[in-house]
Image (cartoon, rainbow, N blue to C red):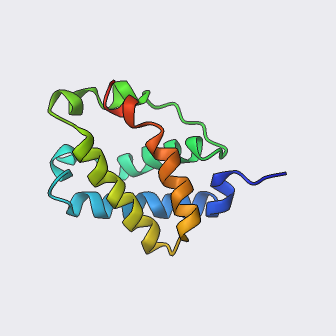
């Protein structure tokens, strides 16, 4: 039986660490950090961990908003492909921080990228 992407990554611990590093990089990136002003970053990390667990095939009880609703306000404020590209760079940095190999990083990027159009409401 094939492993899920969640299992390949190392499960809950790795996904939670990746979410942590992701927000470290997002908050340091001037192209996108303004979209995260005045938010509870710890709560956001938990939401991201749950969402990633879900899309990576792990045992998630993700009950958050769908991507269109979750990003509606950001889209209204101008969220674009450029911003998603910057976030994806942050994802790659977070995975690098965790020494995730190139092949697995590609799988993660592909899984997240599959939600781009929903995030941008198109």
Q: In terms of depth relative to the viewer, which is nearer, 122 or 10?
A: 122
**Compared with residue 96, is residue 18 higher up or lower down, i.e. above or below?**
above
- Which part of the image, by quadrant, shows the C terminus? top left
Tell me if I can see residue 38 in this picture.
no
Q: Residue at x 46, y 61 (%)?
A: 18
Q: Residue at x 23, y 46 (%)?
A: 83
Q: In terms of depth relative to the viewer, which is nearer, 17 or 78?
A: 78
The residue most toward the right is 1
Report x, y in % for residue 99.
51, 75
Report x, y in % for residue 97.
43, 73
Tally of numbered tags: 0
Tell me if I can see residue 78 in this picture.
yes
6 displayed left or right of 84: right
Q: Residue at x 49, y 72 (%)?
A: 98
Q: In terms of depth relative to the viewer, which is nearer, 24 or 92?
A: 92
Q: In terms of depth relative to the viewer, which is nearer, 116 or 15?
A: 116
Q: Quadrant of residue 11?
A: bottom right
**Compared with residue 82, is residue 16 higher up or lower down, i.e. above or below?**
below
**Compared with residue 70, is residue 50 higher up or lower down, i.e. above or below?**
below
Report x, y in % for residue 14.
56, 64
Q: Residue at x 29, y 63 (%)?
A: 25
Report x, y in % for residue 43.
37, 47
77 displayed left or right of 100: left
Q: Quadrant of residue 81?
A: top left
């Amino acid at each position: 039986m094939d492993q899920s992407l969640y299992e390949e990554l190392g499960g809950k611990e790795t996904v939670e660490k990746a979410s942590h590093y992701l927000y470290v990089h997002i908050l340091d990136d001037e192209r996108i950090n303004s979209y995260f002003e005045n938010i509870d970053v710890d709560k956001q990390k938990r939401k991201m961990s749950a969402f990633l667990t879900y899309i990576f095939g792990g045992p998630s009880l993700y009950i958050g908003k769908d991507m269109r609703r979750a990003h509606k306000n950001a889209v209204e404020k101008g969220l674009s492909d450029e911003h998603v590209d910057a976030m994806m760079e942050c994802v790659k940095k977070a995975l690098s921080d965790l020494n995730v190999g190139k092949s697995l990083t590609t799988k993660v990027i592909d899984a997240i990228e599959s939600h781009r159009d929903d995030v941008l409401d198109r």
